[in-house]
Amino acid sequence: MSAARPLTTLRNVAVIAALPLLLASCGYGSETKTDEKKVAAEGAKLSADTVRLGYFPNLTHATALVGDQEGILQKELGGTQLKVSTFNAGPSEIEALNADSIDIGFIGPSPAINGYTKSKGKNLRIVGGSASGGVKLVVNPAKIKTLDDVKGKRIATPQLGNTQDVAFLNWISEKGWKVDAQSGKGDVSVLRTDNKVTPDAYKSGSIDGAWVPEPTASKLVSEGAKVLLDESTLWPDNKFVITNIIVSQKFLAEHPDVVEAVLRGSTKTNEWINANPDKAKESANAKLKELTGKPLGAKVIDAAWPSIQFTNDPLAATLQAQADHAVKAGLLKQPDLAGIYDLRPLNKILKAAGKPEISDAGLGTK
C-alpha cells in the first residue's frame, strides 16, 4: 500500500496537468479571442474558471488596456481565464453587469453612481480606482478666446448625464448661466454627441467646442482646437475620479479571490505605467489598434497621455461631489451612496505590499 500511493499521486498529477489541453481541445473558452499572453501557461485556477472584464477603448481606461496587453492581469489570475468585452458608454456596461454578462468593469463615476442608486445599492460595489483627470474643454479659437466667450456657443458632451456632461453643467451653473439639463438649451447649447462623432462635428462647424475625455480632446486639438480649460484645475489637488473599478456584488461574494487577483493586476499595472510611461503609452496604443483597428497618431496620444494620472485610489470624496453636481443639475435625486465602496480587498493588497491604505470617505461597506 505504501508503494502504491506515490504512483497514484503521480497519475493524478499527470491527469491534472493534462486537463487544460483536454479542455482546450473541446473548445473551452472559444467565445473569447485568446493569444499566448492571455492563456495562463502555469498557475493554479482560482475559484472561477473565467472572469469577464469590461472596459472602454479609451486612454482613461489605460490601466485595463495595458494590463490586458501586457498580460499582467492574466498573470495574476493564473489558471483562471480572462475574458474581455469592450464598451463605448457607461450605461451599456452597467446593463451588461446587471445582465450577468460581465463580472468586473472599468467605468466612470456617473454610471457607477446611477447603477448603484437605481438598484437600491444591490448590484455593484466600487472596489478600486484606476485613473484621474484626462478631461478638457477644447474650443474653436476663432470663436472662443476666453471662458466667458463660451456663453451662447454650441458645446458637445459625450452623453446626457454622463460624467463629462454633469461636470460641464456644473461649471455652467458656477458661471451663473442657465441651461435646461434635459434639453441642453439655454445660455449655452449643450449638444450630446458620441465621442466618435465629435471630431467630425467640430470639423464641420456644427459645434464650437467640447467638454470631453482623452483622447477625444487631443483629437480636436489636432484639428485646430485649443484647450481652454483642464477640468483637473477645478478640483482639490488637481485630482478627481475619471475611472473606477466595479464588481457585481454576487461575483464579489462568490469569488473574492478572483477579485483580489484582478486588483493585484491593476495595482501592478499602474505601478508599471507610472514607472514606464513611454512603454505604457505604446502598449495602450497597441491595444487600441487591436480593439478599434486603428492606433492613435503620435500627435494625439503624446498630447493626451500626460493629463491622465493612474492611481489605485478611487478618490471617494470626489465621487460624492460628482453626485452632488448631478443632483444640482436636476439629473439625479439625492442618492444614498453609503456602501457603494468595498475597499477591503484593495487595502488588503496594499497593506501586504507595505503601502498605505485608501479611504472610502465614509461610503464603504460596514
Image (spheres, rainbow, N blue to C red):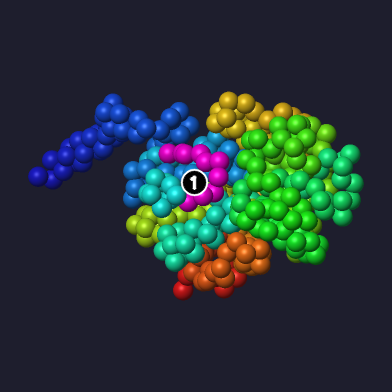
- Which segment is the magenta one? 83-94
The secondary structure type at the circle numbered 1 is helix
Name the residue: 57% across, 30% down: 292
Name the residue: 87% across, 55% down: 148
Q: Within the image, what quadrant is residue 51 found in?
A: top left
Judge left or right: residue 352 versus residue 100: right
Classify mark 1: residues with Cα within 10 Å, few (<14), some (14-19) or many (20+): few
Name the residue: 78% across, 35% down: 205
Residue 210 at x, y percent in the picture: 74, 45
Depth check: give the residue in front, 330 or 3: 330
Residue 191 at x, y percent in the picture: 69, 46
Q: Residue furthest left?
A: 1
Instruction: Give the amino acid at mark 1.
Output: Ser
Q: Within the image, what quadrant is residue 231 found in?
A: bottom right
Residue 133 at x, y percent in the picture: 70, 52
The residue wearing badge 1 is 92
Q: Within the image, what quadrant is residue 208 found in?
A: top right
